[in-house]
Image (spheres, helix red, strand yellow):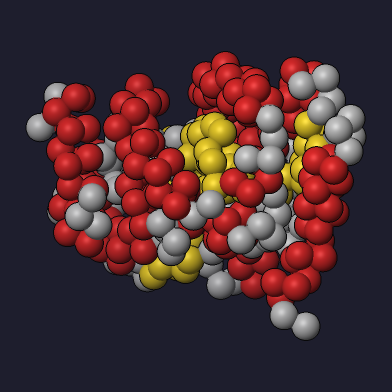
Amino acid sequence: MLRRDVIRGAGGLALAGTVGGVAGAQAPVRWDVSLPWGPSEFHTVNAQRFAREVAAATNNAVQMTVHSGGSLGVRANETVRSVGDGVVPMAEFAAFQNVGDLPLLGIESIPFLIANYDELKTMHDIVRPTWERELERRNQTVLYVVPWPMQCFYFKRPIATAADLRGIRMRTYDRVTADMVQRLGMVPQQLTNPDIVPALASGRVDAVMTSGTTAVAQRYWEFLRHTYVTNHLWASNLMVVNNDVWRRLPAATRTTIQDLAKRLEPEFWNVSRGEHDTRMGELRQNGMTVEDPSPALVQAMRQATATMADDFARTNPAAGPIIQQFRQRVGRA
């Protein structure tokens, strides 16, 4: 049996429910929502809130069931294809994990391009219309976009300079972060979230880059000891819906859901903003050190990655004008 057939079996109830909802005027539309994150991670909690509020706003005409932890069988790095093909009607995915289908989703991963949440919002204002247009071509509509908190490096031993990084096997997200890791003398190991803990347990990786949210959810203190708040890149999640099922809804219902997503998105960003300090505190409580990287390490990281924005633009020509406009808006042109 083909793997896609297995996934269709897992998500088929959602599509059947949607068709049934259209056939019967009063029957609710039911969609399964696939998420790769664990049940307690804030993106999952946000999605559950969105589902509840959609049900309330539509008088239960649209009912969404959130399935966390990849339980529907959709791999994190195959979500764009799965939603576009109708394998699942709705899903959330990390932009960086789906650059194989849409390379421009990796623009946030360019090291040290975006300094903070305000700059990230500026980048989204510029790049999001292109993301939405490209995803529309892949048969899906974006409902909301929410970032992860700032990124950290997690190690088994203290790291003071770039020399201390040599040979360390580091978890990476995509080609951009793999390039960064190689420039720093580390060995990239590309892994999605569910694969990190098995890789740590088996010794496949020695270190991880991710947010504090994932570090706590996956109990990194069982494998690693030292956290450095590098803030070297940003990563966001997109909640999307398959256009075939989306367009079966009445126009007024689609507008209600889009307006709700627009209202909730800033609140979800505020949840993200509060996550970092909370999770860093939990790491400390469980015996991990949490500190800023040394000035020498930061300088080495910035020097090693200084040309990566230009490299990204050469590989992805559409990114060049976006990066230029972003730098102008934040005063770094």
Q: Residue at x 40, y 49 (%)?
A: 134
Observer able to see residue 254: yes
Q: Is residue 48 above or below residue 310?
A: above
**Relative to 316, residue 247 above or below:** above
- Above or below, 73 relative to 36: below
Q: Which image quadrant: the N terminus?
A: bottom right
Residue at the image position 63 percent from the left and 28 percent from the top: 251
Is residue 212 among the parts visible in the rendering? no
Q: In the current view of this chain or complex, which residue is farthest to the bottom?
A: 1
Image spot of residue 153 (x, y percent): 45, 48
**In front: 249, or 10?**
249
Residue 330 % position (x, y): 20, 25
Q: Is residue 253 left or right of residue 17?
A: left
What residue is shown at x 65% (from left), y 72% (from top)? 202
Q: Position of residue 325 (x, y in %)?
A: 17, 33
Q: Is residue 196 left or right of residue 323?
A: right
